[in-house]
Image: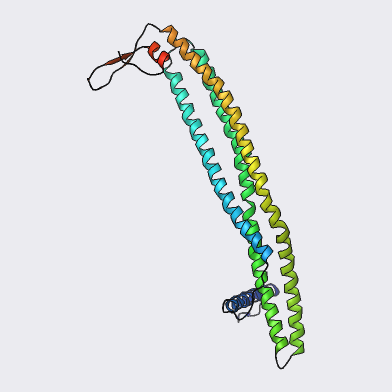
Amino acid sequence: MADNKMGPNLQAGAGFFAKRVQKSLNRAQEKVLQKLGKTMETKDEQFELCFQNLNKQQTDGSRLFKDVKAYYAAVKAMHETSKRLSQTLREVYESDWNGVEDLALITDSEDLLWNDYEEKLNDQIVRTMENYTSQFPEVKERVAKRGRKLVDYDSARHHLEALQSAKKKDEAKITKAEEEFNKAQNVFEEINNELREELPVLYQSRIGCYVTVFQNISNLRDVFYKEMSVLNHDLYNVMKKLETQHSGKAFIIKGLNRNNLTCTYTHADVAKSGTITPH
């Protein structure tokens, strides 16, 4: 015959599971009674304010993190597009044209500058926001645990009050209920006090996070734009060398206009006026 006896580990596991089920039932019953107005829920206005701030902080942080990631993705896309544009220019730039060696140096420098900008954005902006927002799931779980312990505390209190107000008092049950109430109270007050201290500190940390992120963005942009401006100036000078080398040749664009004419433009026209004037 099969042995139906459970070992010590299985018995302990079954007992633990039974306690969890009973706790869940007690909590559900207490919440129903509270909704019906038959029992009163313990209120903590200071904690409620902290919890509202936490929800707002998490919403704001998640929104900012989403936009930071979008900004970083856009920079990466712009880097890739700029790199392809530079590569195409190098491929179409003929070997006997003035500035061909300078062009290679400029485009390589641009790529390095984009790489540096991209890496520092990731290190100083994306990871900062990632670390900042990663705090919230653990904190919200502790808040949820605090909510469960509050229900246990209220349930134990109401159970004790019911025994104490009964016409026929059972001192043994009252004593046991007092022990369970004191235990539930201590557990609840411990986590409640911890969160009341920690949540305001976490809420204030948003200021330091925002300052760090946007100071870093400002500094990185400033350096990137200044160095890119130098490279842009160098690229412009290369084009000027090419223009000078081939100054006698016209820049011709063929297309249809109202008169169905072919329009011809010179380098001098474009450089002088900033616009294209047909001849």
Q: State left or right for residue 191 relative to residue 74.
A: right
Viewer-proximal residue among 3 and 192: 192
Splitting the image into 4 quarters, where does residue 7 fall? bottom right
Is 246 or 16 nearer to us in this picture? 246
How many callouts does the rendering have?
Answer: 0
Q: Position of residue 238 (x, y in %)?
A: 49, 14
Q: Which residue is drawn at 63% across and 54% down?
A: 136
Screen quadrant of the N terminus = bottom right
Indicate left or right for 103 with 201 as reference.
Answer: left
- What residue is at 52 percent from the left and 14 percent from the top? 102
Residue at the front extreme of this rendering? 273
Among the 4 quarters of the image, the one containing residue 12: bottom right
**Which quadrant does the C terminus fall into?**
top left
- How far across and how far down the image is residue 91, in percent? 43, 19
Residue at 61% in and 59% down: 52
Tell me if residue 207 comes above or below residue 79 in the rendering: below
Q: Residue extending furthest bottom?
A: 168
User: Residue lying furthest left in this view?
Assistant: 259
Give the percent coordinates (x, y) of residue 192.
71, 65
Colour approach in the figure: rainbow
Q: Where is residue 78 in the image (x, y as percent from the top left)?
A: 49, 32
Q: Is residue 158 above or below residue 56?
A: below
36 sits left or right of 11 in the view: left
Image position of 258 with respect to 65: above or below: above
